[in-house]
Image (cartoon, rainbow, N blue to C red):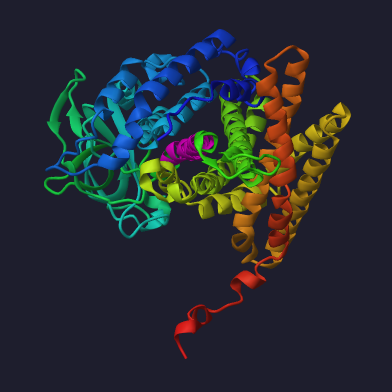
Amino acid sequence: MADYKAPLKDMSFALRHNARMEQLAQLPGFEEATDDMVSAILEEAGKVANGILSPLNEVGDNTGVKLVGDEVPTPEGFKEAYQQFSEGAWGSLQFDPEFGGQGLPYSLSIPVMEMWQSANMAWGLCPLLSQGAVEAIFHNASDELKAQYLPQLISGEWTGTMNLTEPQAGSDLAAIRSKAEREGDHYRIKGQKIFITWGEHDMAENIVHLVLARLPDAPPGVRGISLFVVPKFMVNEDGSLGERNDVKCVSLEHKLGIHASPTCVMAFGDDEGAIGYLVGEENKGLACMFTMMNNARLAVGLQGVAISERAYQHALEYAHDRVQSPAVGTKEAGPIIRHADVRRMLLTMKSITEAGRALAYDACASLDFAHNSVDAETKAKESARAAYLTPIVKGWCTEVAQEVTSLGVQIHGGMGFIEETGAAQHYRDARILPIYEGTNAIQALDLVGRKTLFDRGEAGAAVQAEIAELVSALEAQGEFATEAAALKTALEQAQTAQTQLLEGAADDALMPGSVAYNYLMLMGTLCGGWQLLRSALAAQQELVNGGDETFLNAKILSARFYAAQVLPRAASFAQMVAAGSESVMAMSDEQLASAWFS
């Protein structure tokens, strides 16, 4: 398997020009996010990812995990890698210094997280979920719970999980049956949760579970869900660990990918009941959990970028090394990278990955501006912008990761279908991404529902206005006239689709759900072009200032390729949105199965 090398140049570039890091460093609390600090953090994180985590990726995939009694030993090297992660304070970058964090921008933690996911996605899921748990506790819990749990979660001494899904309750959280009974200053939790990532392991001394459950007098549906902190080991008043709580892993799932990440069935309260502590208010747990979910959705979108980057590096190395028949214009056999179709696939992988990176970094930067800007209008604008972009980042970046990792297998030819080459692992690992933290159908419904129909397209129009400004800038620059025209066409298609959605939903209740996926993919394709062409303009300016010619010209060529070969996909997605619900909903349930029945 090819070694991973963190793409530090592209990460730094995306932070400067897409995440607006220089502007972020001028906000109160972010003054330490200087160029030197950013470079130092990325360089050191790259060493950890390249030298420690990446070599364990294939080991973990081959070894997997097993339940031994109530414990889940991790593959060789995983525990030691986590200890180095914790000792390096890598989980503390963006968190409040009051609880041991470093107070840096969230968007600066994003390329660091990307490195963990590229280097070893199964391992990287553990700190990813811990950071989401920190967000949920920090924004919703009492001061007492914050003091008791945040320092150890931020330091990495403890890890966190998210416990939503139950056998009968997948995306439909209204169907949750886990129970919580009041008992003094705490609650007794009983129930079973499934698909709990890193629900049990040996990498940290304690695991802090965030659990959704119902009180006996809770109202029905999602309005009656509460959120609880349920530690694996009880925490004494002095912060030391006490007895084991009544929570355990009872089985592990055997999965298509991410083999080294334990996906657990968790039993809460098989005996006297697991002790839990309320986060926020009773019956308002779903809102608290969504603090964690929204964070996780951006992180999963970033995982799509990360696994795409790893697959691209793997395929690029193979294309350089694999010698086959002469390419057109050559007389002797040579590396397959000389063949036009291999170059098409590599450029598709490269441009989509860079587009996704820029988009994810930009969306996360909006959260930083929303939280730390002093101007109320800016806060509101950036908050709406982040909310609008979140389902696009999660949905589009993980959907195209399926394409990118599949192309990685294809470039390897028959060897890609052989596990020993490693290309298949990226393909297998990527497949979970459109599913967890809210399926991409849910992301699409969120985009068309809460983020478009609910505000009558206001947030979408604001993003479209930014894209229109870029079109004007590209036209004025002169060298990007063709790309400006392609972006303008895709923008107009998106604007038309939004109008059709707003008008059509009023007359056809089935339309939003029928067109949601294609609407999300249309906006993702458009936003990818927007971000890459922003990058192209910035790269052109850096060339004028004497920047790295090889890298900067490659950025421009990636944008040109995307505009010519990927952006035209917007037209087909727009056409499918225009088709509405009729063809999707016309066939009956019986007709769907008509091939088997007379």
Give how far across and how far down residue 592 sits, in percent: 51, 77
Work out whether residue 362 or residue 58 is closer to the camera in this orientation and state it. Answer: 58
Is residue 567 found left or right of 100 in the rendered image?
right
When the figure is inspected, residue 28 is found, relative to residue 179, above or below; the finding is above
Residue 100, relative to residue 79: is it above or below? above
In the image, is residue 29 above or below residue 79? above
Span highlighted in magenta in the image: 289-316
Question: Residue 18 vs residue 544: left or right?
Answer: left
Question: Which of these two is toward me, 304 or 404?
Answer: 404
Q: Residue at x 78, y 41 (%)?
A: 487
| Residue 553 visible, this angle | yes
Q: Is residue 142 visible?
A: no
By secondary structure, the bulk of the magenta-drawn segment is best described as helix
Where's residue 522, x and y in %?
A: 67, 50
> On the picture, is 200 further left or further right than 497?
left
Residue at the far bottom in the pictured view: 598
x%, y% of residue 361? 58, 29
How many numbered badges does the structure rendering display? 0
Residue visible at 49% across and 83% down? 595
Outermost residue on the front side: it is 331
Query: Is residue 134 rendered to the left or right of residue 76?
Result: right
Is residue 146 in the magenta section?
A: no
Point 63% across, 38% down: residue: 338
Quadrant (top left, top right, bottom left, bottom right) of the N terminus: top left
Residue 468, quarter of picture = top right
Q: Position of residue 4 (x, y in %)?
A: 45, 28
Question: Which of the two residues, 450 or 525, is positioned nearer the viewer here?
Answer: 525
- State the image quarter where residue 130 is shown: top left
As displayed, is residue 482 above or below residue 535?
Answer: below
